[in-house]
Image: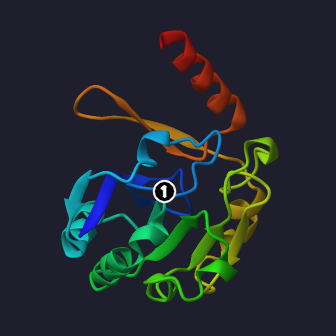
Amino acid sequence: MINVAETCVGTRALGDGLRSVVWVQGCPFHCRGCIAPQWIPFRPARRVEPAALAAELLADPRVTGLTLSGGEPMEQASGLAAMVRAARAERELSVICFTGHRLAELSGRPGAAGLLAELDVLIDGRYVRSRDDDRGLRGSDNQRVHHLTGRLAGSAAALEAGPRGAELRMRGDGTALLVGVPPRALADGLGALAKETA
């Protein structure tokens, strides 16, 4: 079972093409300025079987890729690898994954090799707010974009240093979900608004 914090079907804000995103619950890093602090605690969220999650993420037939984020995907590597395999049994997909771990640190980590084998791009390293250079899909300039296959080689420049994008999605309960790596001005504005309304 995968402990899912949130999903989004059909976005262009987190990688090449139309993608679906899963954010998992739980992260050991507690990066200062994390865009999703509600997904840091290791607590039960929504438990979903890998095949059911794959079906949910592929609900839009136009989706051509998956993005895995969180929380920390490597904490649920085995379940996510099974989900990607189930999704790829249905259609050809590219897969991008964010992790706070460095690629070299993942050797020997339970389940990591299986998930890495399913990824096309890994964006590694912890978010450092003071190093947010407002460029690319990575959150700060210490993070690295690793192309593990050639599937997204044509998007290398955009992933590394292209303009950022974000979308606001309304949930059924009237709350909003921020999807993407927001431009710094948007992130700062949302932070200021949250302080005003707190």
Farthest top residue?
196
Q: Which residue is mark 1?
A: 27
Amino acid type at circle 1 is Cys
Helix, strand or loop under label 1: loop
Q: Is residue 59 left or right of residue 117?
A: left
Instruction: Pick the residue in front: 141 or 174.
Output: 141
Q: Percent position (x, y) of residue 37?
A: 49, 41
Q: Percent position (x, y) of residue 64?
A: 42, 69
Q: Quadrant of residue 157?
A: bottom right
> At 73% across and 49% down in the image, what residue appears?
128
Instruction: Pick the residue in front: 109 or 198.
Output: 109
Q: Percent position (x, y) of residue 148?
A: 62, 84
> At 60% across and 73% down in the image, what residue appears?
122
Name the quarter where the N terminus is drawn. bottom left
Q: Residues within 10 Å of mark 1 (few under 14, many from 20)?
A: many
Q: Quadrant of residue 14?
A: bottom right
Q: Percent position (x, y) of residue 130?
A: 80, 42
> At 37% across and 64% down in the image, what residue appears?
63
In the image, is residue 75 above or below residue 192?
below
- How are the residues colored? rainbow
Q: Is residue 153 visible?
A: no
